[in-house]
Image: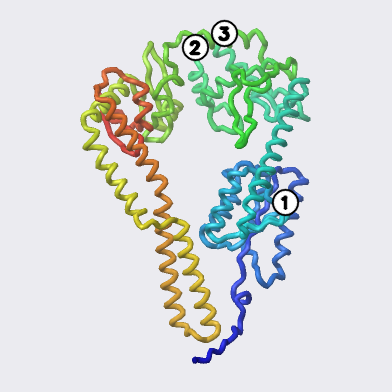
Amino acid sequence: MPTVTIIQPTISEEQNHKLRCAAYCRVSSNSEDQINSFMAQTRYYEKAFEKSDREQLVDIYADEGITGTREDKRDEFKRMISDCRKGKIDRIYTKSISRFARNTKDCLKNIRELKSLGITVLFEKENIETADMTDEMMITIMGGLAQEESTSISQNLRWSCRKRMANGTYELSCPPYGYKKINGKLVICPEQAKVVKEIYDSYLSGIGMISIMKNLNERNIPCCKNSERWHMIGVSYILTNEKYTGNTLLQKTYSTNTLPVRRFKNNGNADQYYVRNTHPAIIQQETFDKVQRLISEKNQKQPRGTPHNSALHKHIFCGSCGSILIRKSCREKYYWSCRKHDLAAVDCPTKQISEDKIHSAFIRLYNKLVYNFKPVLTPLQQALQDLKYKNTKSGTTIIEKYKEIAKLKEQTHVLARLKTKGFLDEAKYLGQTTELNSKIAKIQTEIKKLNVSDEEDETLEQLDMLIGYFEKRQKLMVEFEGSAFESIVDKIVVKNQNELEFHLIGGLELTEKICS
């Protein structure tokens, strides 16, 4: 029987390889107390790893003055997740679940992804580490409590705001054009107030909003601090804002009670509060009322089908500058004009196009597809299905790919230990590690391709819908149908005055001539 002698390692794995740790910190406001807390968290993690033999701190990811209910607003958090995917981190430390996320869905989604990458998260306050599978139930509970806490705080703040609105003590955070804020009170800004009065006088004298806007830009009249040029929406805002009469209408918008919080225009969904004499007036109430009546009369005189009721609204884009086209009426006919060209013709060459011509181009395209959708769409559908099958026929998932990378990285660690112990010379070490790194890079490329599969599935689904739509619609179109346009067209790009590029659902792009 052979005799086996165990040779104990002379260098422990812990000495050769330290866990790469990251710390995530977050405070939810920019107040002085919170910033102090933020600095304290950062200093704590810097000191915690100074004398550690088993762990090393690779980076501190810190979001300052950012909400935890929305992951897309946390740049440092997104950077940390990206570094995890790149294999730069083995473990994440964070103060508590509420610091990591206050949205249960996002919390669990990220933790599950991190676990699939072999990365653990340690929540110090709750003493939970995600390496233990049974902790997911605890994370769900704690994440739910953190979300409920965030919702409760949000509701309390909204209740406080409504209370101050009701008793007339609510203060505006941002002064409108024509005013500035001094000691919490709105004070008239003389130079801007002159512009406000001019806009009202011009509109009452029969000058339209677009003409007023152009006149202000030609004279280089300064606009608000957030914009270099005047726009029609800014002129409209001034002409319809009751604050210029010295009164304030509060809660013009409202927020949802559930996460993620969304804001909507208040069309009778929530209480509004009209507070009189809150600040000095720039415009007399009588003048303001005359302007509102004039705006109402002009809106009633417009032909049916306002820009917001048109199927083309927010679907037409300029091929030269990328701007969205707006709908304009002239002598009871509609035209679509590039916003940039409308402000200054020298900035964009795309001229306005008759809506009737756009409708006619769509009808011709639609009728061509009615007859030819099978030879046009079916090959594209088949190509996408073949690509999807090629990517998934092996049954290999992204997680399995990451596991392969983990095994290859473990082999590089073994090679490093063998080289350290003198069992492997430099040339063989470099050759084998180069080969392993090449395999890792190849798998990472495959992962990128697999990540595209979700987009391929969505495109394939849209193509199926498009083919199904034309299989049911065998009749030719005689007059423009808005419902048909919205069903099959994603957007239109105006290439020039003679060509329109229709982007259909499913990614198909077809060009159609504009007939004169």
Q: Amino acid at mark 1?
A: Phe
As drawn, the label of residue 94 is none
Of 288 and 116, nearer the camera is 116
Q: CA distance from mark 3 to mark 1?
A: 53 Å
Q: Which residue was labeled with disc 1?
A: 38
Residue at point 34% right, 49% down?
Answer: 388
Location of residue 200 in the rendering, given as x and y in whole percent from the top left corner: 59, 14
Q: CA distance from mark 2 to mark 1?
A: 53 Å
Residue 226 visible (yes or no): yes
Query: Is mark 3 in CB contact (under 8 Å) with mark 1?
Result: no
Residue 417 left/right relative to 354: right
Residue at point 62% right, 52% down?
Answer: 136
Determine crowd level at label 1: few under 14, some 14-19, many 20+ residues with C-alpha closer than 10 A.
Answer: many
Q: Which residue was labeled with disc 3?
A: 293
Q: Amino acid at mark 2?
A: Asn
Of 392 and 200, nearer the camera is 392
Determine crowd level at label 3: few under 14, some 14-19, many 20+ residues with C-alpha closer than 10 A.
Answer: few
Looking at marks 2 and 3 on the same chain, the residue that comes earlier in the sequence is marked by: 3
Residue at point 31% right, 37% down?
Answer: 509
Look at the numbered disc 1 and give the secondary structure of its residue.
helix
Looking at marks 2 and 1 on the same chain, the residue that comes earlier in the sequence is marked by: 1
Q: Quadrant of the C terminus?
A: top left
Quarter of the image where one finds residue 484: top left
Location of residue 30 in the rendering, given as x and y in whole percent from the top left corner: 71, 43
Of 367 and 205, nearer the camera is 367
Give the tally of numbered discs: 3
Q: Which residue was labeled with disc 2?
A: 299
